[in-house]
Image (cartoon, helix red, strand yellow):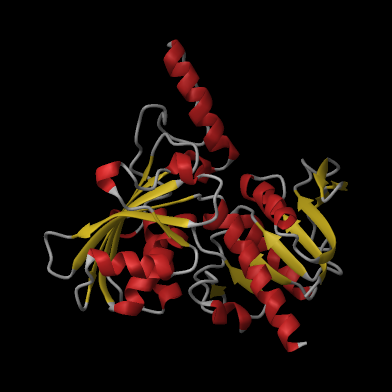
Amino acid sequence: MMFGTVAVLGATGAVGRIMLELLQERQFAAQRFRLLASARSAGKSVAFGGQELVIEELTHEAFAGVDLVLSSTPDPVAAEFLPSAVAAGATVIDESGYWRMKPEVALVVPEINPEAALSAEGIIASPNCSTTQMVMALKPLHDASRLTRVLVSTYQATSGAGVQGTEDLIEGTRAQLAGEDYRYRAFSHPIAFNAIPQIGSVGEEGYTSEELKMVYETRKILGVDDLPIAATCVRIPVANGHSESITVETERAISPEQARELFAAFPGITVLDDTPNGCYPLPSECSGKDEVFVGRIRRDLSHPNGLSFWCVSDNLRKGAATNAVQIAELIGRDREATA
């Protein structure tokens, strides 16, 4: 189905830019595209679909006549402006963290819970990037033998902190190699040649907001409110692509051989698992791709029903922009089928 007017909110940000690339690459069907951003970016032009689109200033009135909004903004912006988009009659797919855990808002990964998007009204939330790739890997295991516990440590790229995060990595590394000082803006500690075991603010029991997102968002997407999950999230000096070390326990043991088959059969997952020959997912090789990559699949030697594996995905694509565009495509197909 062709949408009427599609607005991309936050079009100049790291995720917004990739949304625009994907809409062109995937030939997303719409009569008209509009770009919305802050007053600072308004008036600039962006090449899109063989033409130049002028960025419009985001206001509460800017959503008039818009059918679909793809939004990637800071939480306060999403909280303030997206209700105006819904009031104007638009379906909203939001990348911010503000709406995800609202009980009335669907939190969607299309390969896992498409029905949540199709029955939603108003705002549909896309999960946190680190959550998205993990739940993609958890879902086929959970369907085969119910998950009873999840342990995850993440190794997250600087692009997850936005354009400034990437600049901090590049310029901070240059400065350190040259023996010069650099004032970091996205990070509270130097990221060059370092690892920072805090992403987000500190919340309950000493866990960070990023870690708690992985807990609560995963439970909501999988529909298991009491699933035990423990997460440790670390920022590392990698430009793009989040990596995760995941150990699961299941009701019945899943062998590594069975897990490989389950992963390989699940849409959106690619298995790279030949450790003796150095074949496993690397962020440098997974960046720019839309799949979730899984490797290092092995038994957990500490638990009879345990399984450990390594998971990598481009946090700006499947972790954000790609997932949002896939939700939009899902809604478009459903409307076409029921028209």
Q: Residue at x 46, y 57 (%)?
A: 292
Decide if residue 308 is in sight here: yes
> In which quadrant will I find the N terminus?
bottom right
Q: Is residue 134 left or right of residue 247?
A: right
Residue 165, placed above or below residue 220: above
Decide if residue 135 is in sight here: no
Q: Is residue 197 left or right of residue 105?
A: left
The answer to which of 285 and 146 lies nearer the viewer is 285
Q: Residue at x 41, y 75 (%)?
A: 222
Image quadrant of residue 27?
A: bottom right
Residue 114, placed above or below residue 264: below
Residue 320, placed above or below residue 31: above
Residue 151 in the image: x percent, y percent? 26, 60
Q: Is residue 30 left or right of residue 252?
A: right
Residue 236 in the image: x percent, y percent? 39, 38
Image quadrant of residue 230?
A: bottom left
Q: Residue at x 46, y 23 (%)?
A: 173
Residue 73 in the image: x percent, y percent? 64, 53
> In which quadrant will I find the C terminus?
bottom right
Residue 240 in the image: x percent, y percent? 50, 41
Image quadrant of residue 29?
A: bottom right
